Amino acid sequence: MVDFKLYTITGEQFHEGRDLKHVMEEAIHGGSDIIQLREKKGSKREVLKKARMLRELTKKYNVPLIVNDHIDIALAVDADGIHLGQDDLPLEEARKIIGPNKIIGISTHSIEEAREAEKGGADYIGVGPIFPTNSKDDVVDPVTTSYIKEVMNEITIPFVAIGGIKLHNVDEVLEAGATRICAISEIVGSEDIKGTCEEFLVKINRSKESANA
Ligand code: 3NM
């Protein structure tokens, strides 16, 4: 089973002038334990090139690499899995292509979508956007932390909270019961990427400890 605490997704618009490899390596140094290549614009070849680079990097640190949407590229670089949105290839079809051993993550914005993803054999779900975000086009209204509580009550596969999560509001997300956090802008747009990841992890670990106490 896939498990992780701090999921970093690429977002090159937030770090102009800074190299993608360097940015993601800093996130890994800060303790980010899963990485997603999310590239909505480039040509297939450009995305493939970035995926190859990130595959090499994540192999070096033994961190899973997930590719957003492009199943062909995920297979070509032997990524650990794919992440799909509600408008991408349906889970069932994606599973046929990618096989039983790869990770499939699904973005969900309602409990109905979460149920469907779980039933369809997703390995994890994204739960969001918790807060408003400018990092995703056509994003739905914030689902708030109440959606986290719904998911916790019903869904048994791992879930990761996403959308507008920052160091200043992550405690609220953790208090609602999330144990895995995903961010784009707060991490890759930070002046101190490693330090930001470390701060997220302190908060995540502290929340876990108090939940187990
Ligand atoms: N998916 P930031 S929200 C890629 O709710 C993505 O499914 C979301 O970026 C969802 O941390 C989102 O900068 C954007 O808000 C997350």
Image (cartoon, rainbow, N blue to C red):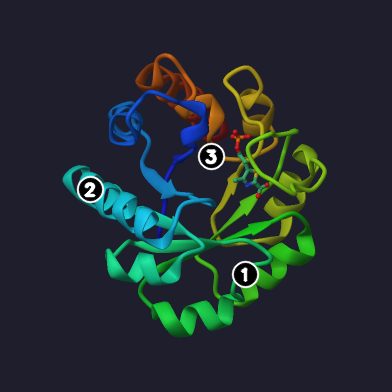
Of labels 3 and 2, earlier in sequence is: 2
Residue 161 shown left or right of residue 77 in the figure: right
Residue at 49% across, 37% down:
11
In whole angstroms, how far apart are the C-alphas of marks 3 and 2?
19 Å
Image location (x, y in percent) of residue 160? 57, 47
Residue 1 shown left or right of residue 209 in the figure: left
Instruction: Classify mark 3: residues with Cα within 10 Å, few (<14), some (14-19) or many (20+).
Output: many
- Compare residues 53 and 101 and report the one nearer the observer: 53
Element marked by disc 1: helix
Element marked by disc 3: strand
Residue at 31% across, 34% down:
28
Mark 3 belongs to which amino acid? Cys
Mark 2 belongs to which amino acid? Asn
**Residue found at the very far left of the displayed protein:** 60
Instruction: Classify mark 2: residues with Cα within 10 Å, few (<14), some (14-19) or many (20+).
Output: few
Element marked by disc 2: loop
Does mark 3 have its CB less than 8 Å from ligand 1?
Answer: yes
Image location (x, y in percent) of residue 46? 36, 53
In whole angstroms, how far apart are the C-alphas of marks 2 and 1?
27 Å
Q: Nearer the viewer, mark 1 or mark 3?
A: 3
- Look at mark 3 in the image and give the residue it sits on: 182
- Look at mark 1 in the image and give the residue it sits on: 118
Residue 79 lies, with reference to residue 148, above or below; the image says below
- Look at mark 2 in the image and give the residue it sits on: 62
